[in-house]
């Protein structure tokens, strides 16, 4: 039942939607941290937990360095990563934007465990009241042998009240059985502190990722 509810949550809010900025979903948005400022995103999940501060290097380039924890096994540190995100446009000004993300993921011995890269596209719709995000990319895994997978996803940010938003996304690897994630974003302090509460799983039995997640994002305005 929850799977069909997730699909409805993705479609229905288009009629009453509103844009969101910072995000902690699998599908990324074509936007970077406010110029001359930073942001901190951190969330705890039943599968994985993340901590990732970011800073604006230029108006269109964001640099993130963070850690990934294995929440399914006592919140043990699992990997660390560096992410470069370039978005030359501004979705709020132009109504659409595109970008590119590159990120190597390392273990704590300094070995490259994973690498992911994807293009992203965001477009405001319905007179600027909603935003759709599209991702398409590739990730590589350095296990026994190098393995590669194509990734794709679509996400919508929909507002239902001034401080409450619905987040919904569907994503897949190698265009196989997709997974979903949906939930709420609460503006604790508008334009500064937001909290996400989401749940997701695969459309096939046994696919538990991404599970239940609760997170917080701190997104101050320009600071220097």
Image (cartoon, rainbow, N blue to C red):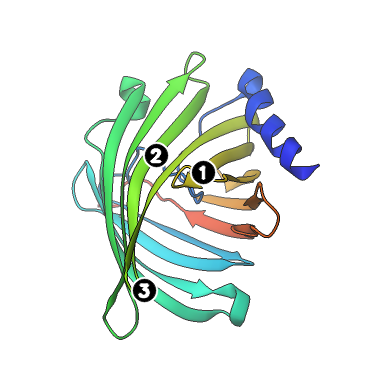
Q: Position of residue 54 (x, y in %)?
A: 33, 58
N-terminal of the pair, mark 3 or mark 1, is 3
Left or right, 182 with reference to 80: right
Residue at the spot of label 2: 135
Instruction: Give left or right: position of 183 versus 19.
Output: right
**Could you tell which of marks 2 and 3 lies nearer the N-terminus?**
2
The disc, 2 or 1, on the residue closer to the chain's N-terminal end is 2
The residue sitting at 22% across, 41% down in the picture is 60
Extreme front residue here? 145
Q: Position of residue 176 (x, y in %)?
A: 52, 45
Residue located 45% across and 67% down the image: 51
Find residue 34 and report its image quarter.
top left
User: Alpha-carbon neighbours of circle 1 within 10 Å: few (<14), some, or many (≥20)?
Assistant: many
Please provide percent x and percent y for residue 169. Answer: 56, 40
Q: Are marks 2 and 1 in contact (CB under 8 Å)?
A: yes
Q: Residue at x 61, y 65 (%)?
A: 45
Which quarter shows the N terminus? Answer: top right
The residue beneath circle 3 is: 143
- x and y percentages locating residue 179 in the rendered image: 59, 47
Q: Secondary structure at mark 3?
A: loop
Task: Indicate whether 205 appears above or below 221.
Answer: below
Q: Residue furthest right?
A: 1
Q: CA distance from mark 2 to mark 1?
A: 9 Å
State the residue in front, 135 or 218. 135
Q: Residue 183 has which mark?
A: none
Can residue 105 be seen at all in this image of the molecule? yes
The secondary structure type at the circle numbered 1 is strand
Residue in view at x 49 percent, y 49 percent: 26
Per the image, the residue denoted by label 1 is 171
Q: Quadrant of residue 185?
A: top right
Q: Nearer the viewer, mark 2 or mark 3?
A: 3
Locate residue 19 relative to residue 108 in the image: left or right. Answer: right
């Amino acid at each position: 039942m929850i799977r069909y509810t997730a699909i409805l949550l993705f479609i229905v809010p288009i009629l009453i939607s509103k844009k969101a900025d910072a995000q902690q979903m699998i599908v990324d948005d074509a936007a970077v941290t406010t110029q001359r400022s930073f942001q901190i995103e951190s969330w705890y999940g039943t599968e994985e937990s993340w901590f990732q501060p970011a800073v604006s290097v230029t108006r269109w380039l964001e640099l993130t360095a963070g850690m990934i924890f294995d929440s399914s096994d006592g919140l043990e540190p699992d990997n660390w990563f560096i992410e470069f995100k370039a978005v030359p446009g501004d979705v709020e000004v132009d109504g659409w934007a595109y970008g590119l993300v590159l990120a190597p993921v390392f273990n704590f011995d300094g070995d490259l465990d994973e690498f992911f890269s994807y293009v992203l596209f965001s477009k405001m719709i319905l007179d600027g009241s909603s935003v759709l995000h599209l991702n398409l990319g590739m990730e590589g895994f350095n296990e026994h042998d190098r393995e590669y997978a194509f990734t794709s996803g679509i996400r919508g940010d929909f507002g239902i009240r001034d401080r409450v938003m619905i987040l919904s996304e569907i994503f897949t690897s190698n265009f196989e059985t997709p997974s979903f994630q949906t939930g709420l974003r609460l503006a604790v302090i508008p334009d500064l502190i937001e909290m996400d509460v989401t749940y997701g799983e695969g459309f096939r039995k046994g696919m538990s990722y991404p599970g239940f997640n609760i997170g917080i994002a701190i997104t101050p305005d320009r600071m220097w």
